[in-house]
Every structure is written in C-alpha cells, then in structure tokens.
C-alpha cells in the first residue's frame, strides 16, 4: 500500500521504518535560478519538482519587530538595521554569510529596554517553502499568512514544519556569538531571563498558530551550538543553562501538541547528541561533512534513538557523478544496515555550484537505493 510523504516522514521521526528514506533539501535562491536556466521548468519550485517529502514551513519570528531600515548601499553591499535592531552588512544579489557590525543587546540595560517587544502577537508568523530564505516567505498579519497556508495545494500530502530557534540561537541573533558566550559565564542570570521570556513567547505563539487552524506536522528547531571542532561551550553548561528551556519548548510541541522534533546544528555537535535526545529531539540535521559528521557512523551509535537528516556533502554534489554516487549509495546502505531512519538532504544547503543535472542524478540515486 502506498503512503503519502506526510505519513513517510511521520514514520521516520516516530521510530518506524517506512517504504523508503525521506527526501528534502534547501537550494539557495541563486541555485534555483541556475536550475531554471538548466532545465527546471519555470514557475515550479524545486521542492515540488523533485517531489520532496518535506515542502512547506511556518516560521515563528522571534524578532523585536522593528521596521527594517537600509543604512548604506553600494553596488556590492547593503547595510541594514534589521528587525532586532542589529546593524548588519549583506552581499547584494548573492548568498553569503552576513557581517554583523553592531548587536542589539550588549548589556542587561539593552535587554530590559527591548524585552517588552518580545510578546506573542499575530504578526509573528511567515509561511513558505522549507529551505527558502526569509524574504521569500509570505509574512505580515496572521490573516495573510493563514491565507497563504490555506492556498497551498500540498498540505494534505506532504510534511509541514513549524520553525523556531533554540534558546541559544535566539540569543545569538541578538547578541552575537562572542558576547553571548561571555555572558554565559559572567551573567547567566541575564540569559535565563531572556530565555524565560523567549520560551513563553514561543508557547503563546504556538497557541495563536493552532488557534488559527494551522496544523503543522513537526517542528524544526535551529540551534548552531557547535563549530567544526565541537561544541561552542561545555556539555555541562548546555545541560545546566540552555537545555531546560529547549526542553520546555519541546515538551509543549511534542507532548501537548503531538508534533515531532527535528533539531538543526551546523558544525560538530556530537558531544550534545545525548543531551538533545534527553531533551526530546526525534532527528538531528544537517550533519556537516567538513566538521567530521558521518551518518554511516552515527547510524550505528544513535540510530535506535533518533533519525538523521542530511550529510550529503554539498561539495561532492558539485563534483564528479562517480563520487556523488558513492557518497549517496554508501550512506543510504549504511543507514539501512543499521536499521536506522534517514532523510536524504545536503549537509547544510545547496549552493549554486551544484548543477540541475547533478541534483537530478542524486534524486535518481535515492529512488534507486532508498527503499527499505
């Protein structure tokens, strides 16, 4: 009996083995533009064309809700004051890591001034394709977002996320990594107050979302708690300081609302996997290859506890097909041998170095090797 994409991902995240591995990915806007030139039919999103099991995403937007302002603009760059009040320099016309110039929160006084702006309200939602950049989402009033959600034709068949940052990622977006890491040592009380208010806002936003009739299937929680060589702070600090708030968010969505949890961290969060499992995650993503993550090993170590999503090197996607085939085949086969659960995905997102031909070839490989 055939199953839907929604059913397939639900099974993978709940501990069951479905008909095949799942499929999802996040091609950059520039990548999708390249693919349109190379054969992707105009007007069709890559998620739809490649029959991704995960397609749409509802964002809870945890900003201070300032109006974004352009402060400076050149042919190459744009400097803005964003919705949090951060000053950030961006590339124009291409994806890349932005350069923070000034953070909104540098002290307790900044937080106390901005805290009243972090209340749940009907303007904290956006809806669009999973993996798209935020400017591509439909955002605005709850009525507008709900209208875009209701107009989506694939909701009954495919898996839909609701997305929010984890507590660390929330604070990092407003303080910057260096300041946040120092405050975790010197002013933990400031951070626990921030995370208390943030957690309350997420839960109350969830109530608004569900009350409006939107019904996501799972939660995507983004928290870059690691870098190439490991965690950004000790596992003990994570357990004592951050994890209680992450667990409260997971408890709300998972145990009260019945949604499954996918946790995202770039880098190498291996030391944190046990803590994340304790907190209640169902899947770890994106398993960055250059940071030493390898699903062939992880499947044997943790495959009885969680599913995995990612680990196909974007660099390998851009190269010879023989190497791409070896990567995809060996990882799918290793996961299946371990009796683990897997959603095929790049190890971060898909850059514009990846051709439409290569990505199509990868999807064909999933069809060929992905059956359980």
Image: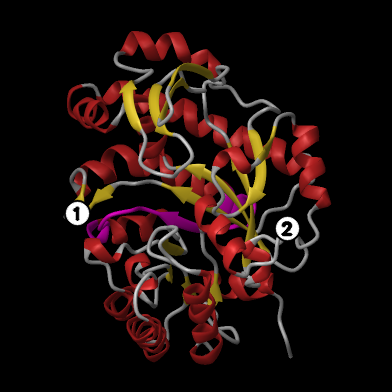
Q: Residues within 10 Å of mark 2 (few under 14, many from 20)?
A: few
Mark earlier in primary sequence (2, 1): 2
Quarter of the rendering containing residue 305 = bottom left
Find numbered disc 1 in the image and state the secondary structure of the residue it sits on.
Answer: strand
Q: Relative to 75, say whether 67 is above or below.
A: above
Disc 2 marks which residue?
A: 43
Q: Relative to 291, say whether 213 is above or below.
A: above
Position of residue 145 measured from the top left corner of the image (x, y, whole percent): 74, 38
Q: Which residues are magenta?
A: 253-271
Write the residue at 29% across / 13% down: 107
Find numbered disc 2 in the image and state the secondary structure of the residue it sits on.
Answer: loop
**With 253 as the anchor, is 225 left or right in this view?**
left
Which residue is nearer to you in this view: 145 or 361? 361
Position of residue 95 measured from the top left corner of the image (x, y, whole percent): 43, 45
Quarter of the rendering containing residue 346 = bottom left
Write the residue at 38% across / 27% down: 89
Q: How is the image coloured?
A: secondary structure
Quarter of the rendering containing residue 167 = top left
Specify whether residue 44 is painted magenta. Answer: no
Disc 1 marks which residue?
A: 230
Position of residue 233 measured from the top left corner of the image (x, y, whole percent): 20, 43
Q: CA distance from mark 2 to mark 1?
A: 41 Å
Q: Quadrant of the N terminus?
A: bottom right
User: Is label 2 or label 1 in front?
Assistant: 2
Which residue is nearer to you in this view: 227 or 168? 227
Write the residue at 38% across / 91% down: 337
């Amino acid at each position: 009996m055939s199953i839907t994409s929604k059913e397939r991902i639900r099974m993978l995240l709940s501990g069951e083995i479905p008909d095949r591995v799942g499929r999802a990915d996040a091609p950059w806007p520039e990548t999708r533009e390249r693919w349109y030139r190379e054969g992707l039919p105009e007007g069709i999103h890559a998620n739809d064309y490649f029959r991704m099991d995960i397609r749409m995403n509802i964002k809870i937007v945890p900003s201070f809700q300032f109006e974004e302002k352009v402060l400076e603009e050149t042919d190459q760059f744009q400097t803005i004051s964003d919705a949090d009040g951060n000053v950030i320099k961006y590339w124009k016309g291409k994806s890349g890591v932005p350069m923070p110039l000034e953070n909104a929160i540098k002290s307790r006084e900044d937080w106390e001034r901005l805290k009243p702006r972090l209340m749940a309200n009907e303007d904290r939602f956006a809806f669009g394709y999973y993996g798209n950049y935020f400017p591509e989402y439909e955002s605005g009033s709850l009525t507008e977002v709900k209208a875009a959600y209701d107009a989506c034709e694939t909701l009954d068949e495919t898996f839909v996320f609701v997305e929010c940052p984890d507590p660390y990622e929330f604070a990092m977006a407003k303080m910057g990594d260096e300041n946040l890491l120092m405050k975790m040592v010197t002013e933990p009380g400031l951070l626990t107050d921030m995370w208390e208010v943030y957690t309350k806002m997420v839960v109350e936003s969830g109530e608004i979302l569900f009350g409006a009739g939107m019904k996501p299937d799972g939660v995507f929680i983004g928290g870059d708690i690691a870098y190439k060589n490991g965690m950004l702070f000790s596992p003990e600090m994570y357990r004592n300081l951050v994890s209680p708030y992450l667990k409260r968010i997971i408890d709300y969505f998972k145990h009260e609302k019945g949604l499954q949890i996918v946790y995202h961290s770039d880098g190498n969060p291996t030391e944190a996997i046990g803590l994340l499992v304790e907190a209640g995650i169902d899947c770890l993503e994106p398993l960055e290859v250059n940071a030493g993550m390898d699903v062939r090993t992880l499947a044997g170590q943790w495959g009885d506890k969680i599913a995995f999503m990612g680990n196909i090197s974007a660099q390998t996607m851009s190269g010879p097909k023989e190497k791409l085939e070896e990567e995809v085949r060996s990882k799918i086969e290793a996961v299946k041998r371990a009796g683990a659960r897997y959603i095929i995905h790049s190890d971060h997102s898909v850059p514009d170095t990846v051709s439409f031909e290569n990505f199509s070839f990868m999807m064909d490989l999933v069809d060929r090797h992905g059956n359980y």
